Image (cartoon, rainbow, N blue to C red):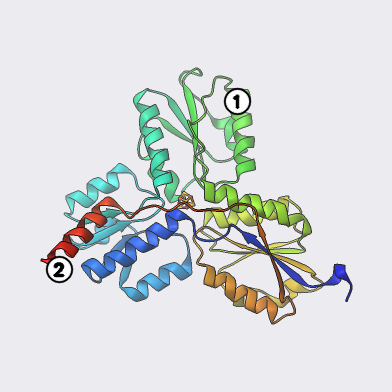
Amino acid sequence: MSETSRKRVLLAKPRGYCAGVDRAVQTVEESLKLYGAPIYVRKQIVHNKHVVSSLEAKGAIFVEENEEVPEGATVIFSAHGVAPTVHESAKARNLRAIDATCPLVTKVHHEARRFAAEDYDILLIGHEGHEEVIGTAGEAPAHVQLVDGPDGVDKVTVRDPSKVVWLSQTTLSVDETMETVARLKTKLPLLVSPPSDDICYATSNRQHVVKEIAPDCDVMIVVGSTNSSNSVRLVEVALQYGAKAGHLVDFAHEIRDEWLDGVTTVGLTSGASVPDDLVMDVLKHLAARGFGEVEEILTAEERLTFSLPQELKRDMKKAAALQNS
Ligand code: SF4
């Protein structure tokens, strides 16, 4: 077999779990250990089918709203963040609320509050209906306007063009967001940028490595769920940067043999809410079809970790002290 027709997999790194997802999943697991099942979780803790069903098997009950949680029970808020009204309704129902919002989403909430307090119009770039956007907008509903991609710019109207800031969802396409911002700046030259990037390090890093390998890939397989914004973006980015085809799968068995017909190089990555064992399953699946050669392409080292939510750490400490007394 010639060098060019050798079947291989280019495995992207960084891929998979980010610090915010790792913390959110640990928050549910530690809460189950500490308080016992059932633990209620408002919305999917992270947007991944496998993670949600594994936690359900351990005793987590996923609900849509606080009203479904029995009074006095424990509820965990997901990594995507919640509006202040959700904290208020938990309090009104006397729920023990543990907030697993990713600290990088919380940072965007702080920015929204701060600019609203200074009476700015806030243009929030994001996907309509996404939980994170609902949570961030809920910090200052009277000041926030959603801009859903470059085509949303035409609809924007502001009170004072010299007092407008843009913020964004953390899991968007970096390139598309820059295009939206460029169009906004044409319309509003005095538009203020956020103090630091709102698109998080994990989203940018996963897109960056995909951009590197996409031109060499006949097909890019992204492991992730269809409701995972950052996973869906990885398929789009792969196609934009030269992969001939791209597919999103939750599990290895969803890969169709015809996707591999005539293929020499498969790109493989996963969204920020995907445990790596699912990627390893895909590697085994591909190896069984002749793609046993794997080259990992590393473009960034990630060492960030977040500590568990304060309220959970405090209860863990109390429980440990009781045990030792
Ligand atoms: S994708 Fe980014 S913002 Fe979302 S949980 Fe992970 S680190 Fe936090």
Quadrant that contains the C terminus: bottom left
Residue 276 screen position, x and y as percent: 53, 68
Residue occupying the point 34% across, 26% down: 117
Say if 182 sits above or below 278 in the image: above
Say if 258 sits above or below 132 in the image: below
Residue 208 can be seen in this image: yes
Q: CA distance from mark 1 to mark 2?
A: 59 Å
Under mark 1, the amino acid is Lys
Viewer-nearest of labels 1 and 2? Answer: 2
- Mark 1 or mark 2: which comes first in sequence? 1
| Location of mark 2 (residue) | 323
Residue 89 screen position, x and y as percent: 23, 49
| Location of mark 1 (residue) | 185
* Quarter location, residue 69: bottom left
SS state under label 2: helix
SS state under label 1: helix
Residue 63 can be seen in this image: no
Whether label 1 touches label 2, CB < 8 Å = no
Under mark 2, the amino acid is Gln
Residue 243 screen position, x and y as percent: 75, 58
